[in-house]
Image (cartoon, rainbow, N blue to C red):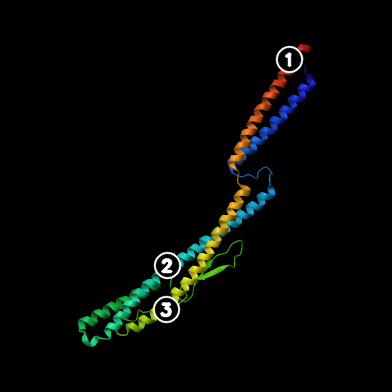
Amino acid sequence: MPSVSNIAIGANLAAAAGTKARHGMNESIARLSTGIRAMYGADSAGHSVGTTHNAQAKSYAAATRNIEDGISYAQTGESVLLEVANLAIRLRELGIAYDNNALLDSNQTAAQDSEAALIYDTIDALLDRTKFNGVEVVDSASAKQIGIAYEGNSGTAFNVGPNQAMTAQGGNTAADGADGDADTVLSEVATGLGNIAADLTALKAFQGAASATSANLMATSARIIDTDFAEETANLTKNAILNQAALSMAAQANQAQSAILSVLQ
């Protein structure tokens, strides 16, 4: 028969094992409920690295959103200039047709003048009033700065826009000479579209790089910080079994102690 002292030692070991198992269960429950792996001082260095990567990833994500706004702004300008080009092409047709005015009656030339005047006004309206988020798209020769900063690099910016002054057409009302005015507009539009095309190429490259970097940093951060739910669920189950076994062993040891003491008495 085992001695009382040996049974007491066994009971203490069982109690210690149960305490350790319950501590493991609590840690697993905390990790599963918060989704954070590095808790209770575990892998503090890794947690620091993961947090840094997460901050960098969010900076890149913010830069990506800025770039997307810049792309939308540039595409709005592109659409406006394409519409202006279509109007200028029609204006040029009217000007060339007016050169044959010796064979036209007054009603026909008046109709040409009326259409030309409307096109002139429409071109100015498109250039002056089209806005993106309240900002004029083609308002001057100056481009707009788009912030593409990340990781605290606040000086990083990119200029986007037609970057081409457009000649106002509001003072013109006749088809006579409209082809020359149209040529001026088409030349300015071509320059603006070329600048926008270059901006879009660069911005899309920045967008791809920033978006990929953000995704990679987020994935790295998740691998370091986030809980592995399958692994942690298995740990929780294991510690629950160990805790139950320890409680059972402690109960048996206590019963054995009581039985021996009752015999001795």
How many angstroms separate mark 3 from mark 1 (CA)? 104 Å
Horizontal relation, residue 198 to residue 259: left or right: left
Residue 62, x across and y down, in percent: 54, 59
Secondary-structure class at tag 2: helix
| Identity, as a three-letter code, of the amino acid under mark 3 | Glu
Location of mark 3 (residue): 188
Nearest the camera: 20 or 142? 20
Write down the quadrant of residue 217 in the picture: bottom right
Identity, as a three-letter code, of the amino acid under mark 1: Ala
Alpha carbons under labels 3 and 2: distance apart: 17 Å
User: Are discs 3 and 2 less than 8 Å apart at CB?
Assistant: no
Question: At numbered mark 1, what does the secondary structure look like: helix, strand or loop?
Answer: helix
Residue neighbourhood size for the residue with mark 2, other residues' Cα within 10 Å, grouped as few (<14), some (14–19), many (≥20): some
Left or right of residue 22: residue 167: left
222 in relation to 203, above or below: above
Residue at image position (66%, 53%) is 49
Q: Which residue was labeled with disc 2? A: 76
Please say if 182 is above or below 62: below
Q: Which mark is residue 17?
A: none
- First reached walking from the N terminus: tag 3 or tag 1: 3
Q: Earlier in the sequence, mark 3 or mark 2?
A: 2
| Above-or-below relation of 245 to 264 | below
Instruction: Check disc 1: other Cα within 10 Å, few if <14, some if 14-19, many if 20+.
Output: few
Number of numbered markers:
3
State the residue at coordinates (30%, 82%).
95
Distance from label 2 to label 1 (Cα)?
A: 90 Å
Classify the position of the C terminus by image quarter: top right
Question: Do callouts 2 and 1 mark residues in contact (Cβ within 8 Å)?
Answer: no
Q: Residues within 10 Å of mark 3 (few under 14, many from 20)?
A: some
Residue under pointer 1: 259
| Residue at the spot 56% in from the left edge and 55% down from the top edge | 215
